[in-house]
Image: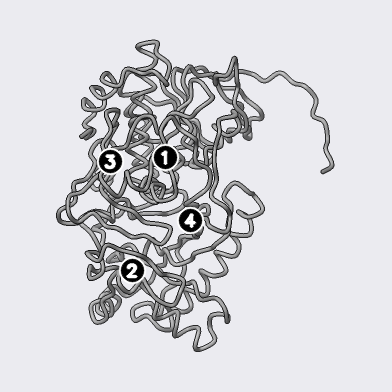
């Protein structure tokens, strides 16, 4: 590959802080709030113009759609996201569960308020491009933005990029699922102009269940059986009809999925219908192709709904998510890597930083937490090997494929994020490195912050 040498340069240090969080999705936002509430001077950096990540930037509004009668749920900051959204008019009842779907647009403001209330330094529109390393430990990051190249120094850093970008660039060992086995990427979108009464009447006339997800090859899943007859806001039939009528190109058989909420004003939101295999979220060429192909398929889906879904006859596109939804890229090799057995068999750990229900969604498995089962999220899964002063929060914590199908879910990302933020503050207060942190002190702080530990 042809190369061009870059001239050496000095970079201005524009900010110094105790804790720096990179990425503001559910994991990063929870981490920043937890660190600040534990007394650490904290900054939250994101490459976009809003906080919220997968919620606000991708448009995934079903924050706790797994919650049913009998679910023992996590507590703490993740639940706070949902409760604050409800209180601020940024949520609607979710159709398939005992939860509220978040309004992705309004949650941008909710996140602003949470950040400001906690005294977190907001640092939007900055892309983290490199770690600053000293003797094997991270001392800060280099960013690029409209303001140029800048340095931000921190005593502790949390990688909440979702892709372990910072950990990988700092030299921490990571693994990545082979591209052909990765969970599909998605372009989320919403529609407006839907006749709610007619739409809901059709849903009630032909109710779909999780059993309907299986079939035709592209949606085959394995369940425990208890999920099969539960209602699911699943749509596939209009797309089959559209394909038969020639409205969807031959060979495009993967358009199907779920809807989130339908408002009285006629907004049909969180349409999770487009699934793009073999997209590597760490490859900008794949991301470019995925964004464009996803929008193309979404337009076909909209036309199919207009023609074959009652209530959608006069509807049109309201918006696409700001960016592609990625489910699966890098994961760190942590001090402890979660296993499929841990998340399926109620794993228990002395260094638990929170719990998460037995909810597994991915790699052909769907298990919903309807019987009160849950597993512990261990602190060690946040600690990457080989790099000091760094924790990882969100979907890239250490684990195998099946455990990833559990911990990638947004509420669990908030659990690991809250644990990481509190751990960063405790590490500063005690002078202890992350790999030998006082777990009891961390757990006391998390309990003070209303997290459920056991």
Q: Where is residue 174? Give x, y as percent.
A: 54, 37
How many angstroms separate mark 1 from mark 4 (CA)?
20 Å
Q: Where is residue 400? Give x, y as percent.
A: 44, 45
How many angstroms separate mark 4 from mark 3 (CA)?
35 Å
Res 81 → quadrant: top left
At mark 3, the secondary structure is loop
Which sits earlier in the primary sequence, circle 3 or circle 1?
A: 3
Which sits earlier in the primary sequence, circle 4 or circle 3?
A: 4
- Location of mark 4 (residue): 321
Identify the residue shown where x is 57% and y is 50%.
281
At mark 1, the secondary structure is loop
Q: Closer to the camera: disc 3 or disc 1?
A: 3
Which sits earlier in the primary sequence, circle 2 or circle 3?
A: 2
At mark 4, the secondary structure is loop
- Location of mark 1 (residue): 394
Asked whether the residues under the numbered discs 2 and 3 touch, taking CB atoms below 8 Å apart as contact, a structural biologist would say no
Label 1: few (<14), some (14–19) or many (≥20) C-alpha neighbours in 10 Å = many
Identify the residue shown where x is 52% and y is 52%.
323
Identify the residue shown where x is 27% and y is 80%.
206
How many angstroms separate mark 2 from mark 3 (CA)?
43 Å
- Location of mark 2 (residue): 266
Q: Is residue 193 left or right of residue 23?
A: left
Figure check: 54 above or below 265: above
Figure check: 266 above or below 166: below
Which sits earlier in the primary sequence, circle 1 or circle 4?
A: 4
- Location of mark 3 (residue): 347
Q: Where is residue 349? Give x, y as percent.
A: 28, 33
Q: Where is residue 179? Give x, y as percent.
A: 58, 55
How many angstroms separate mark 3 from mark 1 (CA)?
19 Å
How many angstroms separate mark 1 from mark 2 (CA)?
33 Å
Q: Nearer the viewer, residue 318 or 126?
A: 126
């Amino acid at each position: 590959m042809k190369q061009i040498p870059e001239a050496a340069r000095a970079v201005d240090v524009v900010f110094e802080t105790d804790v720096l969080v990179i990425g503001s999705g559910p994991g990063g936002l929870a981490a920043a709030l937890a660190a600040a509430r534990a007394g650490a001077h904290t900054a939250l950096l994101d490459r976009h113009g809003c906080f919220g990540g997968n919620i606000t930037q991708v448009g995934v509004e079903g924050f706790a759609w797994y919650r049913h009668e009998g679910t023992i749920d996590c507590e703490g900051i993740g639940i706070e996201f949902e409760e604050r959204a409800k209180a601020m008019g940024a949520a609607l009842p979710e159709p398939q569960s005992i939860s509220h779907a978040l309004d992705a647009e309004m949650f941008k403001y909710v996140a602003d308020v949470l950040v400001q209330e906690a005294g977190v330094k907001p640092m939007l529109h900055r892309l983290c491009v490199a770690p600053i390393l000293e003797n094997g430990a991270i001392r800060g990051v280099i960013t690029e933005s409209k303001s140029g190249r800048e340095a931000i120094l921190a005593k502790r850093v949390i990688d909440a990029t979702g892709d372990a970008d910072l950990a990988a660039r700092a030299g921490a060992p990571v693994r990545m699922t082979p591209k052909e086995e990765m969970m599909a990427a998605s372009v989320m979108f919403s529609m407006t102009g839907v006749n709610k009464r007619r739409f809901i009447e059709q849903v009630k006339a032909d109710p779909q269940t999780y059993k309907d997800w299986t079939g035709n090859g592209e949606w085959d899943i394995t369940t425990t059986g208890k999920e099969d007859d539960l209602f699911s806001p699943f749509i596939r039939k209009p797309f089959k009809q559209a394909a038969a009528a020639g409205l969807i190109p031959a060979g495009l058989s993967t358009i199907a999925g779920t809807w989130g909420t339908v408002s009285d004003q006629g907004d049909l939101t969180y349409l999770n219908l487009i699934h793009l295999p073999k997209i590597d979220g760490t490859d900008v060429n794949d991301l470019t192709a995925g964004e464009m192909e996803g929008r193309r398929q979404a337009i076909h889906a909209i036309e199919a709904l207009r023609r074959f879904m009652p209530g959608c006859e006069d509807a049109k596109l309201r918006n696409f998510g700001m960016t592609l939804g990625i489910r699966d890229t890098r994961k760190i090799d942590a001090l402890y890597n979660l296993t499929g057995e841990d998340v399926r068999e109620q794993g228990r750990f002395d260094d638990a930083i929170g719990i998460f229900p037995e909810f597994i969604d991915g790699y052909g498995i769907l298990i919903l937490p309807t019987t009160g089962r849950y597993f512990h999220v261990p602190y060690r899964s946040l600690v990457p090997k080989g790099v000091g002063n760094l924790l990882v929060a969100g979907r890239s914590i250490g684990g195998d494929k099946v455990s990833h199908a559990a911990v990638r879910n947004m509420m669990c990302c908030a659990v690991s994020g809250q644990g990481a933020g509190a751990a960063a503050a405790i590490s500063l207060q005690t002078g202890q490195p992350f790999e030998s942190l006082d777990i009891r002190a961390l757990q006391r702080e998390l309990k003070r912050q209303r997290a459920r530990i056991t």
